[in-house]
Every structure is written in C-alpha cells, then in structure tokens.
C-alpha cells in the first residue's frame, strides 16, 4: 500500500516512490497530522466476453470472465465471471 508523502507515493514496505499525478491530488485529504487518501477510479474491464454464459442472478446472457490457478497445479483452474448487465460476480471450479 502506498501513502502520499509530499509530491510522491511511498510504499510502506519497500520505500519505493512514484510521482503523484495531478488528477490523483484531488483525492488526498489531510486530517490533522495524518493524510488520508480517497481514490475514486472508474474500473475499466479488459476481459474477454462470453455471450453463451447466463447470469444466475438476472438471467441475462453475456459475462466477462477470467481464469486463475487457485489450487494446486494438478487441479483445474477456477473461472471467475462478472455479468455485463448487473455486475454480479461468481466462480466455477
């Protein structure tokens, strides 16, 4: 987690620094001696869309999906789905 210090973000663990962008400065709020950061970003989804999968919540077709290896290497991957209509998330093993 990086915290603001002057004009840079500083990693609490390793000390790595990154210059704070101008649009990020709007979210930094000072409270007493401590600075709090409020970062509001629009999440951009660049995942493949599968229009054959049906959402169990809204029953619409069309989901974003991603696959991850969440178990041992000899186990099958876990597929995570996000509905393009209602935003519901679920997974299949």
Image (cartoon, rainbow, N blue to C red):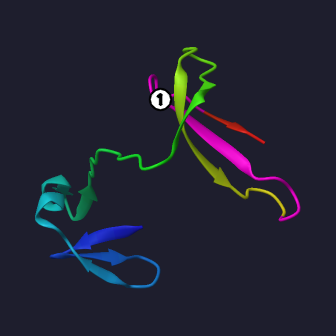
**Callout 1 crowding tier (Cα within 10 Å): few <14, some 14–19, many ≥20:** some
The quarter holding residue 74 reads: bottom right
Tell which residue pokes out farthest to the front in this image: 52
Which quadrant of the rendered structure holds the N terminus?
Answer: bottom left
Q: Position of residue 45 (x, y in %)?
A: 41, 46
Disc 1 designates what residue? Answer: 87
Q: Nearer the viewer, residue 88 or 6?
A: 88
Magenta segment: does it hold 54?
Answer: no
Q: Is residue 51 left or right of residue 9?
A: right
Q: Position of residue 59 (x, y in %)?
A: 58, 14
Q: Which residues are magenta?
A: 73-89
Q: Is residue 15 left or right of residue 63?
A: left
Q: Residue at x 83, y 65 (%)?
A: 73
Magenta segment: does it hold 75?
Answer: yes
Q: Residue at x 38, y 77 (%)?
A: 11
Position of residue 51 relative to residue 27, above or below, is above
Q: Position of residue 4 (x, y in %)?
A: 25, 70
Tell which residue pokes out farthest to the bottom in this image: 15
Position of residue 53 relative to residue 76, above or below, is above
Q: Position of residue 34 (x, y in %)?
A: 25, 63
The quarter holding residue 42 reads: top left
Q: Residue at x 38, y 85 (%)?
A: 15
Which quadrant of the rendered structure holds the C terminus?
Answer: top right
Position of residue 35 relative to residue 91, above or below, is below
Q: Residue at x 59, y 22 (%)?
A: 55
Position of residue 45 relative to residue 75, above or below, is above
Which type of secondary structure does the marked residue at label 1 adopt? loop
Q: Is residue 32 left or right of residue 55?
A: left
Q: Is residue 19 left or right of residue 3?
A: left
């Amino acid at each position: 987690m990086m915290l603001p210090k002057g004009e840079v973000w500083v990693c609490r663990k390793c000390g790595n620094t990154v210059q704070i962008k101008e649009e990020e400065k709007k979210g930094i709020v000072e409270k007493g001696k401590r600075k709090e950061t409020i970062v509001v970003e629009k999440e951009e989804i660049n995942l493949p869309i599968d229009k054959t999968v049906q959402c169990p919540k809204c029953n619409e077709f069309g989901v974003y999906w991603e696959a991850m290896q969440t178990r041992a290497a000899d186990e099958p991957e876990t597929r995570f789905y996000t509905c393009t209509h209602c935003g519901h998330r679920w997974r299949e093993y």
